[in-house]
Amino acid sequence: MVEVNKIFDIAVIGGGINGTGVAADAAGRGLNVFLCEQNDLASATSSNSSKLIHGGLRYLEHYEFNLVKKALTEREILLKNAPHIIRPLRFRLPHQQHLRPSLLIRAGLFLYDNLAKRVTLPASKGIKFNENSPLAASITKGFEYSDGWVDDARLVVLNAVAAQNNGAMVKTQTKCIKAIRKNDVWCITVLNNLSGETYTVHARSVINASGPWVARLFSDALSLKSPQNVRLVKGSHIVVPRIHDQEEAYMLQNADQRIVFVIPFEDDFSLIGTTDVEYDGDPAEVKISEEETQYLINITNDYFKNKITKADIVKTYSGVRPLLDDESVNAQAVTRDYTLELEDVAGKAPILSVFGGKITTYRKLAEAAVNKIVPYFENTGPAWTENAPLPGGDFTHLAVLTNAITKQYPWLPLKLRTRMIRNYGTRITDVLGAASSLQSLGQMFGADLYEQEVNFLIEREWANKVEDIIWRRTKLGLYLSAQQVNDIKEYLLNQTAILARKSSALTKVA
């Protein structure tokens, strides 16, 4: 429970990548942080991305050189700090002369290789496709370059864990419904969606990192005018059984000048996206349209020998990118950079709002946001996240960690061990504890998801609902049957009821 008389230094509103990144950075500098998220961590834009840590090769066409340089620099930092959930990925770009001339692509790749220092990734190169290529026979030439893949939802969760490890209070399913300044302090009324309880949190500053809701929060909860407008752009993806068995991803050019990625996903699938469509509805209700679905199918079939149909789709998802409204003519040209807006009253009770941004530059954004807030406080620590591994990322070589875990838990099957190391890194020992066999992990719900892991996600990673477990903390929803999903749902209801009773008892004792 939140102490009634406690005044936090910072209240962060929003539990996406920017909010949790800010909370982690601020808490690590010694500030008292409260974070509230109206749903689950990463439940909106941050879990519905293309799952790439990349500089943004196509942004060079819009002359976003500074953004690309910043993103490429961050790419190296994140590959180093989160090697369990972020890994290098090689991309192939089939050449279509009528879409972009090879000279233009070569120039773009040269810039991409050299705008920022490369430490871990190889340079780009030209390639030729032979009869073993998964591409249509008419495509014979192309290019290769490197970027990174990320489990986007886990990136958010691990930042929340990092924040909590440094003393932050993280509350999910908790919506900010009112925030007013009173005597140089923000009085923030929040609603617990699960219990229906409302209570007030006090903080000396507020950071509005509510993503697609960043402008709406001003009118709905703050009774203030938003300092910037956001442009909501929908990006949709489809997941199909693996189109090809090669480890590379593909970047496909389309006649409308957009590009679509086809990315190896969870070993057995291909992730295809994204689209760029203007969106003016409720961000919570976003979903893929028939037109987007067919668009992604058509471009995939234009390039690959293995054709797909709507019947092959095993999952779709859509996210709304809250981009800064820079008055670009079309959605794909809107800048992916961010703006931070700071406002206070006589040097007190500041509110900082985050407009725009992309997942690759979240750490730099968070650092810049906290840099703007620390002058309001004394005795804060320096910026620190550049060289700090995210929880579970404190290892140098994956092979060394894998060997250690294999020795410690020799009974762990290869597939389960691989997945858990990808998810948790060195925190796998926190999940497995003293377990000595598969049987000691408790009930198996399906797809190698055991009771002990579910309990860990409830108790240590804020999971409340079945979607939190099977889509954001893991991606096991791709493999689970409807009955297995229902079994997890029933288990969660029982566990949350038990935890609620324990919490109530502790409150009464206190």
Image (cartoon, rainbow, N blue to C red):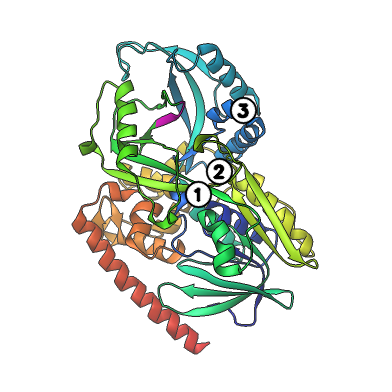
Does residue 489 sit above or below 110 in this rendering?
Answer: below
**Which residue sits at x=45%, y=47%?**
279
Dot 2 amino acid type? Lys
Nearer the observer: mark 1 or 2; the answer is: 2
Image spot of residue 297 (x, y percent)? 30, 32
The residues bearing labels 1 and 2 have C-alpha atoms spaced at a distance of 13 Å
Q: Earlier in the sequence, mark 1 or mark 3?
A: 3
Magenta span main SS: strand
Q: Secondary structure at mark 2?
A: loop
Q: On the image, which quarter does residue 270 sit in? A: top left
The region drawn magenta spans: 257-261
Residue 203's quadrant in the figure? bottom right
For badge 1, the amino acid type reads Leu
Indicate the position of residue 10 as horizontal and vertical percent values.
66, 66
Q: Secondary structure at mark 3?
A: loop
The residue depicted at 51 percent of the width and 54 percent of the height is: 212
Q: Picture coordinates of residue 338 (x, y %)?
A: 63, 45
Q: Is residue 258 magenta?
A: yes
Instruction: Give amino acid for label 3.
Output: Arg
Q: Residue at x 26, y 67 (%)?
A: 490
Q: Which residue is mark 1?
A: 155
Q: Nearer the viewer, residue 74 or 179?
A: 179
Q: Earlier in the sequence, mark 3 or mark 2?
A: 3
Q: Which residue is mark 3?
A: 118
Residue toward you, 130 or 372: 372
Q: Residues within 10 Å of mark 3 (few under 14, many from 20)?
A: some
From the top left corner, tell me how far across and down residue 30 is, in percent: 70, 63
> Horizontally, is 30 left or right of 258 in the view?
right
Return the residue at label 2: 358
User: Mark 2: few, some, or many residues within 10 Å (few <14, many ≥20)?
Assistant: many
Q: Is residue 318 above or below residue 466?
A: above
